[in-house]
Amino acid sequence: MFEIEIKKLSFSFQNTNGISKKIFKDLEQKIHFDKENKIISIYAPFASGKSSLMKIISGIEKQTSGEIYFNNLKKSEDEIIPYLSTSPSSFPWLNVSENISFGMKAKNPDISKIIDFIGLKGYEDFYPTEDSLGFRFRISLGRALAVNPKLIVIDDSFKFMDEVTKSESLQLCRKIADESDLYFIYATSNIFDAINLGDSVLVFRGLHLDSSTIVSTKNSLKTTDEIINQILDLIKK
Amino acid sequence: MSKNLLVYVVILLIFHLIIFILPANQIFPNGHQVLSAVEKLYQDYHLLFNLLYTLTNVMLVIIVSLILLVLLLNNSSVRKFLIKKIKFEKFVLPFIFLIFLFNHWFVSFEYAPLLIATIFYLPYLLKKTIDGIELIPKNYFDAAKSLFIEKDKAESKLLSPRINSLSLFEVYKSLNFVWSIIIFCEFLSPFEKGLGYLLKITFQYWSIEYLISLSLISLLSITLLKAFFHYIEKKFYPWEN
């Protein structure tokens, strides 16, 4: 079981003209992970602050005010929450092995297991090029797995993929979630992807992540269309 | 590489057309005259020694600049200072005038060409490498920072191999520039060494066959140096820059 509690979280930044822009204010949210909810999708409109929230959760950005608690504790100094960005983030100047071992403090003997697990066995010495988004996502995922995290943040990483690559990448995330103790938080503006990957979808309404509702995607009595309609109704309210 | 090679081939073809195929011309020397100029430069003016002297100067300037660049850019505070605070384009001054000035100051110093060329080449190389660093997408830094507790360490670990490869790539692209600075400095130096000195003699005697032979030797040397740096870059940094 794992829980993220967001308390009175605000985030604003100064643009190039020095004008402060509010992204969200006093955000309150509990995100609860368990065996049935290992992947939680966050669905919110474009430019609502999803990426900022994901970056704050993983520790890349600092909030303006408020706190985030992980299992009722503030994020400890040595806790790493890997962030997978929207655009591919495997480093083209490192090969697959070097990319995956990038964040590791010491040489990890399990690196070949990780490479095998993410389906890149035989590609250890390959360099990621711009044209293969699926390949690059696998590398980023492997790099995240190599630091033994509890939680991985995926920030709409499937946005630019074609349907086949996206489907393979979603399946890989599902496989990892099912076969490990890892949890995923996945932010997207694509309602289908949110439902496809998430065990639950946290639906945010409004431009500033104003209010939210959790929708379970594992309700066997509902079809995907019914879940989509339920989410659309929530957004329209 | 292929584009440069094509340009050299075209220049050589034009050159051949003028001096070998059109022997009736009165301006350009024929092939025999050029070859005997090379022979004379070799026998009377120590062409090999002077060529090696220039080549050593060029290599020393590149190595010293590369070492300083890597040291400066791998230090996160210095790197941030250089990227955010120094506007290199504001330092674009008529550098030929400055070379004259520097040469005047260091007139009795034998290694003046080396020093002056480094003073001009290092900021150029820094500017070009920083331009390359600034093109690195922000999401690479985000991904790297999320994997480290010390965010500066993530940035340095991410950038270090990139800085090395970018700087070597920029050296490869700017060989003509560094070669020109060295030749120019040697030309002005009173120490009578290097291809720049031979060029000065050529101008003193106003000998076109010497000028053409020296240009050809320079062209050939730069091409070989470029091939060498291209090989080194691809050998150690096999990704696309």
Image (spheres, rainbow, N blue to C red):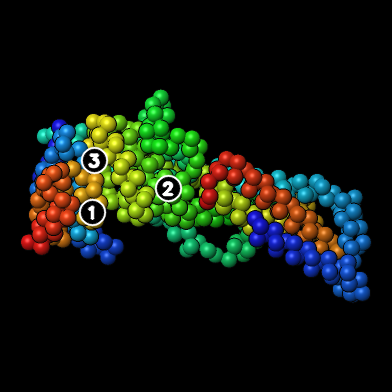
Q: On residue B91, which mark appears?
A: none
Q: Residue at x 86, y 73 (%)?
A: B27
Q: x%, y% of residue A85?
A: 32, 49
The alpha-carbon separation of the residues under discs 2 and 1 comes to: 43 Å
Per the image, label 1 sits on a secondary structure element best described as helix
The alpha-carbon separation of the residues under discs 1 and 3 comes to: 17 Å
Q: Residue at x 49, y 43 (%)?
A: A127
Q: Chain of mark 3?
A: A
The three-letter code of the residue at mark 3 reads Phe
Q: Residue at x 89, y 72 (%)?
A: B22
Q: x%, y% of residue B150?
A: 32, 37
Q: Tell me whether marks 2 and 1 sit on the same chain.
A: no
How crowded pointer 2 is (Cα within 10 Å; few <14, some 14-19, many 20+) is rated as some
Q: For residue A79, which quarter of the picture? A: top left
Residue A210 seen by the camera: no
B239 to the left or right of B16: left
Depth order, front residue of B62/B157:
B157
Q: Which residue is mark 3?
A: A184
